[in-house]
Image: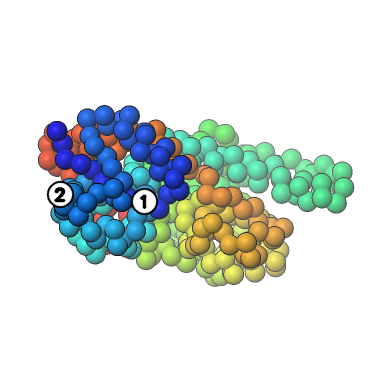
Amino acid sequence: MSETIAFLGTLDAEEEADFLAALAAALPEETIRPFRTLSAEERAAIRIAIVANPDPAEVALLPNLAWIHSLWAGVERLVRDLGGNGVPIVRLIDPELARTMAEAVLAWTYYLQRDMPAYRRQQETGTWRQLAYRPPGETMVGLLGLGALGSAAAERLVGAGFRVAAWSRSPKPVPPGVAGVSGPEGLAGLLATSDVVVCLLPLTGETRGLLDAGRLFAMKPGAALINFGRGPLVAIDALLAALDAGHLSHAVLDVFEVEPLPPGSPLWRHPGVTVLPHISGPTTPASSAGIVAGNVRAYRATGRIPQAVDVARGY
């Protein structure tokens, strides 16, 4: 019988029950128990922890951890809170996440390309007016980030007929039909020429505040922004200023520095902002449990810890 695996998280009772049930179904040979049910002696024997935004103080009470498996793809919070303890952190790499994220990028790009925000404003004022149609082939979409999510999104956009450019810090292979750019000059050129900029970058020391006032006002006049990466990538005060000045036309925001977005945030009521409750790349219990199960079984068979996050890079 394998040793117990600890489950730690700050989920509500229903979410925790759903994930525990999915993990039990995917790993019937393992015993997975919530941290709170473990005695001090049992905690000392834990070698694997499966986590969903855990309390660092609880993780510290597992002194003999060999590795930590996150149930999320984003790990910047784990790196911040736990990166200094030396325990390898394994992020969720889920092909289903790339598909759902690419689906969301295409859907909300269509939302902007087909002028849905303008039609919503017209409805509020009782205005019946048809706007000129702009085909996808006349719309340049600039992707920031060319990892698994960015590549999948680029392929969907190209398939839908959009012109697509994608930026990464250093040169990377790009899907067919995508213009790849890199470095500071590549970023400047992409921002200046894109009708829609889609941010899919992870949050690191280098990307925090990447879209600051200078870069937002360097975007093509009338362009729109979609942020599906992380909230702190965008300087919100500068974004609101660019929208108020009419330099940018709209922003679709699914991620925020504080979540849930506080009721007093001006983003809720701004006519140039669409607020989404972090739904662009949902993690389902079944899909994530399957990925975790594969990694745990491989570790049991070989003793090798799955590829871990580079703490210095932040992802």
Q: Is residue 88 left or right of residue 244?
A: left
State left or right for residue 281 relative to residue 277. left
Give left or right: position of 49 versus 103.
Answer: left
Crowd rating for badge 2 (residues with CA inside 10 Å; few <14, some 14–19, many 20+) = some
On screen, residue 111 above or below 226: above
Near-viewer residue (309 or 266): 266
Q: Looking at this view, is 164 or 94 the one in front?
A: 94
| Point 27% across, 34% down: residue | 293
Identified by mark 2, the residue type is Ala
Which amino acid lies under the numbered mark 1 shown in the image of this protein?
Gly
Q: Is residue 198 visible?
A: no
Give the quarter of the figure containing the N terminus: top left
- The residue at the point 37 percent across, 66 percent down is 205
Q: Position of residue 73 (x, y in %)?
A: 38, 47
Q: Position of residue 232 (x, y in %)?
A: 48, 63
Residue at mark 2 to residue at mark 1: CA–CA distance? 19 Å
Along the line of sight, the residue nearer the viewer: 130 or 287: 287
Q: Residue at x 57, y 66 (%)?
A: 236
Q: Is residue 58 above or below residue 17?
A: below
User: Please, is residue 208 above or below residue 172 in the view?
Assistant: below
Which sits earlier in the primary sequence, circle 2 or circle 1? 1
Furthest residue to the left?
302
- In the picture, the disc for residue 45 is 2
Task: Write the residue at 39% across / 33% down.
Answer: 286
Q: Position of residue 258 (x, y in %)?
A: 51, 62
Q: Circle 1 sits on which residue?
A: 9
